[in-house]
């Protein structure tokens, strides 16, 4: 016995009649946004990177891979691009372990039923709602060379002041500390949500076997949080590699480009030096490096998770 769907008023077929075009109509809005905001910018960016592109000129001569090769020749673009990339990788290597380990530690502390637990969770999460400009101005004031709060405290304790913002090496301190303070609440919230999904019966069984608190954290909590840790690490690495606002506001990339990130240099090359083709080529090279690095990281951590599940 077959069932027929009622037709729309006037004898026309309704959308529920499984017309072959119906799925494509639902996908059309997303496809338009995908083409306009992703595919078209990528294709146009490739076009710019292989032409000597000048928005004020009527001719855009084709130069092939010249701007890509400049990143490997003896050119200023090569020197500044790889130097700022090393700066970015240094920041990533320092900030990511702090943002992951500290967030996990805070989540472990605030998951317990302690007094004012909700208040403390809100305190650690609230900095994340600030804009990067507000965060940068705040931490620039905190580490100001002469009148900053940190140097005032050092002076009151009898220690000499440190010119954080103008000393190579020290300039990374306000950037790194400010970034951890600003973004740690998000990672902490992810870990708190994941901890809430761990069955309490697992901990109860461990207690019956005489496991201590440290052993339960090491052998139960950490392994069961591996999928969340994978997500936290990958997203934190990607965010750190895209470092821009913090050094731009706090140190302006100084001293002597010592804290300039690769995104800052690409922006400078495009909008200060008016070298749009060169900046676009740098963007594609940097984007490719990010994809390769993220894929390796994802495959490595995912393999560890699958290995832990089998054991």
Image (cartoon, rainbow, N blue to C red):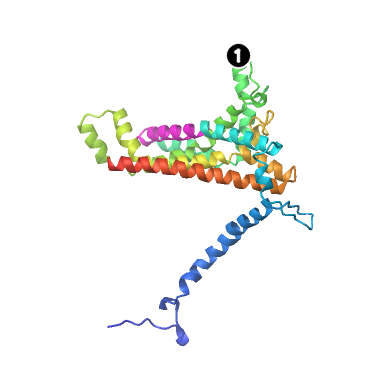
What residue span does the magenta drawing correspond to? 95-116
Asked whether residue 204 is drawn in magenta, I would say no
Residue 115 visible here: no
Secondary structure of the residue carrying tag 1 is loop
Residue 113 position in % (x across, y down): 35, 35
Q: So how many labels did they put on this image?
A: 1
Instruction: Give the quadrant of residue 286.
Output: top right
Q: Is residue 163 left or right of residue 196?
A: right
Secondary structure mostly taken by the magenta-highlighted segment of the chain: helix
Residue under numbered circle 1: 159
Quarter holding the C terminus? top left
Residue farthest right in this picture: 57
Residue 72 position in % (x across, y down): 64, 39
Residue farthest bottom in this picture: 10
- Asked whether 38 or 283 is in front, the reply is 283
Instruction: Give the quadrant of residue 246.
Output: top right
The residue under the point 30% across, 42% down is 309
Residue farthest top in this picture: 158
Residue 294 position in % (x across, y down): 49, 43
Are there few (<14), some (14-19), or many (20+) residues within 10 Å of tag 1? few
The residue under the point 65% across, 26% down is 165
């Amino acid at each position: 016995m077959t069932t027929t769907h009622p037709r729309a008023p006037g004898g026309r077929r309704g959308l529920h009649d499984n017309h072959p075009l119906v799925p494509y109509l639902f996908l059309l809005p997303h496809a338009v946004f995908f083409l306009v905001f992703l595919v078209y910018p990528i294709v146009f960016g490739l076009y710019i990177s292989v032409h000597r592109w000048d928005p004020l000129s009527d001719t855009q001569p084709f130069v092939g891979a010249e701007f890509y090769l400049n990143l490997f020749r003896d050119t200023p673009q090569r020197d500044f691009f790889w130097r700022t990339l090393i700066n970015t990788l240094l920041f990533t290597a320092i900030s990511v372990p702090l943002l992951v380990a500290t967030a996990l530690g805070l989540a472990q502390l605030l998951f317990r039923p302690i007094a004012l637990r909700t208040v403390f969770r809100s305190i650690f999460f609230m900095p994340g709602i600030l804009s990067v400009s507000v965060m940068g101005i705040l931490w620039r004031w905190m580490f100001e060379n002469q009148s900053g709060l940190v140097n005032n405290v050092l002076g009151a304790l009898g220690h000499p002041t440190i010119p954080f913002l103008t000393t190579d090496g020290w300039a990374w301190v306000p950037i790194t500390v400010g970034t951890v303070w600003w973004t740690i609440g998000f990672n902490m919230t992810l870990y708190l949500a994941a901890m809430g999904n761990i069955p309490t019966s697992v901990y109860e069984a461990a207690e019956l076997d005489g496991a201590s608190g440290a052993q339960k954290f090491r052998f139960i909590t950490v392994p069961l949080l591996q999928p969340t840790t994978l997500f936290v690490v990958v997203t934190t690495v990607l965010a750190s590699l895209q470092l821009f606002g913090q050094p731009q506001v706090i140190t302006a990339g100084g001293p002597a480009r010592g804290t300039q990130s690769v995104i800052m240099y690409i922006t400078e090359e495009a909008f200060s030096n008016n070298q749009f083709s060169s900046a676009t080529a740098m963007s594609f090279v940097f984007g490719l490096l990010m994809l390769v690095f993220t894929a390796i990281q994802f495959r490595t951590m995912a393999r560890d998770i699958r290995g832990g599940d089998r054991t």
